[in-house]
Image (cartoon, rainbow, N blue to C red):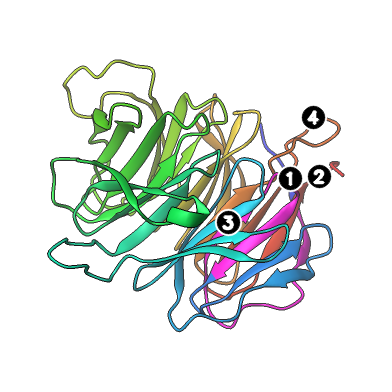
Amino acid sequence: MSLAFLHAHDCSEPHTDAIWGAVWTQADTVLTASADGTIKQWDAASGQVSRAQPAHTHGLVSLDVDAAGKHALYNSLEGLTCLWNLENGEVEGRFESYVRSGEEHIEPSWSVSLSPNSQTYASTGGSGNVTIHSAARDSFGERRATLVSGRSKFGMFCKYSPDGRRVAMASETGQIYIFDVASSSLASTYTTHAMAVRSLAWSPDSNLLVSASEDKRLILHDVRLSPSGKPGSGAVATFSGHSSWVLSVDISSDCRLALSGSADKAVKVWDLAAHAAVSTTQETGEVWSVSWRPHSAANNSAGAFMSGGEDGIARWYRAAGAA
């Protein structure tokens, strides 16, 4: 199978530096967070900016949204975490994770993920653990639990599962940890990658997890499989084809396709069942973020996706024949 994706349009006002995070929301808007310190909300149909936050002093390195697309969580290079209400434009929470209070050690957040119900958020960083924080307005940032990986390796990326029951975290050395949120326990460890894992994406049913790594591969894991104790247990497919680091990944709403962006300046679409790339699009710079449109196209085709990367331009693509 091969698929054709057509370049639909670019954003109207590019960022002045690389886009490090991008999400297409359930509300059919797109958010981009940039190394220039700004976060913008776009109308997906036109590429016009509908709302933006003033530039932060440091770049924004992590971005996530809740299930309804009503709140965005973002984190800066030094570890300032903010919760943005996308309906009224108000920043409802700010937490300076780099500030030490008394004798308590506060780990600066690097990657953050908002729970589907917007009640908590997860963060990871230098310790290799995951911290669960309150996302409530009156207690934003307060620690609720610490999920311990057992390895003191930098946490590159963390992501809540869509059902809110798990948090996945990826490390600088390639390990992936799956935590059970209710019990605050480590459920599984995957050692399927040889280098740092830059991005993770859950399937909408929370059963599958795709990882993107500096080892140029993507790996599909089935989290329902019981760990066997052997390295790499839970891996069901490997996807190779990028010629450099894979920096971002996402899974389509129907769980048929994966999307990846790479330092080789390519965006690839992968057929998960066939374990093969079915579309490749070249861009002008490294592709740091990719995101599928959450809603399938009316004719049940592959739909649409967007990308953001080194050149600061958010780009929209649609499947040939799809509206």
Label 1 sits on residue: 4
Lower sequence index among marks 4 and 2: 4
Residue at 31%, 33% (x, y): give it: 178
Q: Return the x and y of residue 110 as percentages of the image width and height.
A: 34, 61
| Direction from residue 258 to residue 101 in the image, left or right | left
What secondary structure is found at the residue carrying circle 3?
strand
Q: Nearer the viewer, residue 62 or 264?
A: 62
| Direction from residue 264 to residue 270 in the image, left or right | right
What secondary structure is found at the residue carrying circle 2?
loop
Q: Quadrant of residue 4?
A: top right
| Image quarter of the C terminus | top right
Residue numbers of the magenta segment: 6-33
Label 4 sits on residue: 300
Label 3 sits on residue: 72
| Direction from residue 308 to residue 132 in the image, left or right | left
Lower sequence index among marks 1 and 4: 1
Mark 1 to mark 4: distance in Å? Answer: 15 Å
Q: Nearer the viewer, residue 191 or 116?
A: 116
Label 2 sits on residue: 320
